[in-house]
Image (cartoon, rainbow, N blue to C red):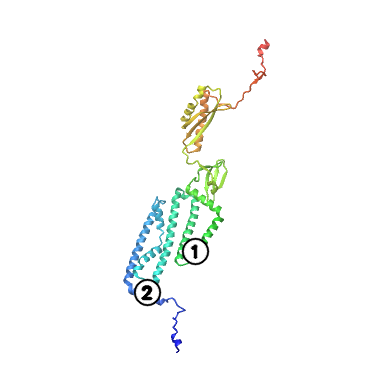
């Protein structure tokens, strides 16, 4: 052997076709683990079982809060409904993760437990958040839980919340597996923007319907006024609202367009204000004209109205103008209409008794000769008796 050969160092041997540990190796390492840490494993198993039972007790307590009668929309019931959806897989993995370190498991088993614990925690968190969000939405809607619109809206909301939360959960799990999720997140963002722009009109009406459900500017069966239309709400849909006008026509208007208008809701009025404009002739005695407000006050109060004000408001072209205002504390418009009618008839009868005459448009013409002296518009005629005599 030459000196050059002797000075050449040996290259390390590289195992090109390295194989994963076979089943026999896994079995032997597991048996060795049991032999070395048998007592720790038994203690850890017992502690894990106790933790599992404790988590099960918490779940049963949450179920009782969920099923409590008469309080389905309370905050405690919402939290109870959320935690009652705790899965057995999550409870098992929490128990295993808490006791795994004490039993000194093999590295591969410990990594498996950590990964499964991460998966269980992420998806369980998504389930809890979904139930809490939906419960708070139902709590916000209050008395509308039985409406068809809310049922349809809740179906869409449930789908959107579920897709959003579980998409985030999947991304978190993939990130823990070492997958580069930057491109996935960017793609989802661009796709969401594209879908939002394409369905802008549909989403606008949908969110307007949700705004009507949650904000409650009006409800089904209530009478509202917008623009020049007074109508009763028959149905609140996800895209449009259907109304029945007081004149009988059926009105259909998109939710987004309706919410952009000034809406007057007549349902929650505790009273209505009625106004009457009255005109008396100029030949009315001034003392009698001065008594008109007191006369009208007496009439209104006799018919269960609440007198507000009354007085002379103008000297019209052919009348002395008065205005009377009074309130009627009744919720039903038909009943208010009848009260207004009774007050009008009472005013007519009382004015006849008092000798007050209503004015109507009149015009008097006067003629004059060239020197400005007023003359009669017709020639003076002698009585018939004088002619015959």
The numbered mark at residue 182 is 1
Image vertical order of residue 349 relative to residue 91, above or below = above
Image vertical order of residue 213 relative to residue 313, above or below = below
| Image point (53%, 53%), residue name | 203
Can you give x and y, in whole percent of width and height, for residue 336 in the image? 50, 35
Determine which residue is flagged by label 2: 30
Q: Quadrant of the N terminus?
A: bottom left
Specify the farthest residue to the top.
389
Mark 2 against mark 1, which lies toward the viewer? 1
Can you give x and y, in whole percent of width and height, for residue 92 in the image? 38, 65
In 3D space, how far apart are the residues under numbered discs 2 and 1 (Cα atoms)?
A: 38 Å
Q: Secondary structure at mark 2?
A: helix
Q: Which class describes the residues within 10 Å of circle 2: few (<14), some (14-19), or many (20+)?
A: some
Q: Quadrant of the C terminus?
A: top right
Can you give x and y, in whole percent of width and height, for residue 338 in the image? 51, 34
Q: Secondary structure at mark 1?
A: helix
| Image point (31%, 71%), residue name | 39
Specify the farthest residue to the front.
3
């Amino acid at each position: 052997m030459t000196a050059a050969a002797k000075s050449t160092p040996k290259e390390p041997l590289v195992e090109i076709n390295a194989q994963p540990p076979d089943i026999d190796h896994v079995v032997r390492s597991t048996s060795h683990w049991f032999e070395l840490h048998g007592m720790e494993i038994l203690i850890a198993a017992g502690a894990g079982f106790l933790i599992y039972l404790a988590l099960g007790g918490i779940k049963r307590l949450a179920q009782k809060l969920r099923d409590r009668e008469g309080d389905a929309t309370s905050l405690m019931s919402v939290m109870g409904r959320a935690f009652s959806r705790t899965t057995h897989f999550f409870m098992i993995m929490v128990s295993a993760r808490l006791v795994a370190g004490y039993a000194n498991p093999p590295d591969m088993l410990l990594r498996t437990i950590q990964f499964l614990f991460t998966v269980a925690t992420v998806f369980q968190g998504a389930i809890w958040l979904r139930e809490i969000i939906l419960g708070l939405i139902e709590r916000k809607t209050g008395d509308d839980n039985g409406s068809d619109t809310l049922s349809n809206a809740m179906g869409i909301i449930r789908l959107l919340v579920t897709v959003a939360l579980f998409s985030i959960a999947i991304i978190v799990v993939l990130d823990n597996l070492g997958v580069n999720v930057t491109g996935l997140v960017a793609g989802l963002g661009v796709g969401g923007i594209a879908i939002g722009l394409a369905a802008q009109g549909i989403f606008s009406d949908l969110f307007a319907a949700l705004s009507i459900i949650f904000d409650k500017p009006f409800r089904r069966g209530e009478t509202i006024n917008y623009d020049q239309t007074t109508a009763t709400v028959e149905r609140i849909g996800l895209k449009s609202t259907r109304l029945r006008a007081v004149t009988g026509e059926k009105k259909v208007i998109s939710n987004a367009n309706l919410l952009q208008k000034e809406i007057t809701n007549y349902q929650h009025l505790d009273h209505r204000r009625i106004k009457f404009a009255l005109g008396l002739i100029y030949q009315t005695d001034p003392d009698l004209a001065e008594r008109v407000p007191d006369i009208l006050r007496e009439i209104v109060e006799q018919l269960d109205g609440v007198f507000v004000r009354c007085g002379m408001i103008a000297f019209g072209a052919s009348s002395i103008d008065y205005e009377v205002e009074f309130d009627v504390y009744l919720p039903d418009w038909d009943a208010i209409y009848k009260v207004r009618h009774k007050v009008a008839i009472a005013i007519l009868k009382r004015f006849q008794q008092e000798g007050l005459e209503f004015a109507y448009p009149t015009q008097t013409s006067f003629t004059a000769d060239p020197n400005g002296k007023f003359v009669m518009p017709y020639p003076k005629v002698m009585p018939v008796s004088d002619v015959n005599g």
